[in-house]
């Protein structure tokens, strides 16, 4: 099997290693990943998740200082949705973050943790 190197700049060719001989992991330059692979962000945008599978390749760019792992689309699972009990727990936690401990009022903003009370009770000291 022969692989062709993409016609790009020298830096991109440096990161082209589809067999994983140089980096120990199949590696592609930025914007040259093969079809059927996606990053976590791309999976999330498509309503998917890695599904417990390890990455199968990587993308390197910015002189090798940036890495994005690639996952197989055919092994990806649908994103899980929160149960009604989990949603209720989240709603209670977010309400608690907006409730002042000093005056007990629910504010339209999250209470600053450094003060432990709303800005009215803190008085701006």
Image (spheres, helix red, strand yellow):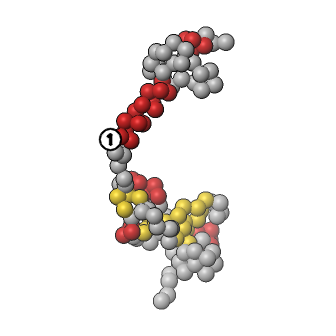
Report the quarter where the C terminus lies.
Answer: top right
Residue ID for mark 1:
84
Closer to the camera in the image, 47 or 6: 47
Closer to the camera in the image, 61 or 74: 74
**Left or right: where 123 falls relative to 54:** right
Closer to the camera in the image, 111 or 13: 111
**Left or right: where 74 falls relative to 65:** left
Residue 60 picture quarter:
bottom right
Q: Is residue 8 visible?
A: no
Q: Secondary structure at mark 1?
A: helix
Q: Residues within 10 Å of mark 1 (few under 14, many from 20)?
A: few
Residue 108 picture quarter:
top left
| Residue 65 coordinates in the image, percent (x, y) | 65, 60
Closer to the camera in the image, 1 or 51: 51
| Residue 77 coordinates in the image, percent (x, y) | 37, 62
Q: Residue furthest bottom?
A: 1
Q: Residue furthest left?
A: 84
């Amino acid at each position: 099997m022969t692989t062709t190197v993409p016609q790009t700049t020298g830096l991109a060719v440096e990161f082209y290693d589809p067999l994983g001989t140089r980096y120990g992991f199949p590696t592609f330059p930025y914007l040259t990943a093969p079809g059927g692979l996606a990053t976590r962000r791309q999976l999330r945008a498509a309503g998917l998740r890695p599904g417990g599978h390890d990455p199968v390749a990587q993308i390197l760019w910015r002189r090798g200082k940036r890495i994005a792992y690639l996952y197989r689309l055919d092994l990806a699972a649908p994103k899980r949705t929160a149960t009604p009990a989990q949603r209720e727990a989240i709603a209670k936690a977010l309400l608690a973050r907006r409730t002042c401990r000093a005056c007990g009022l629910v504010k339209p903003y999250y209470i600053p943790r450094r003060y432990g009370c709303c800005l009215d009770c803190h008085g701006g000291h």
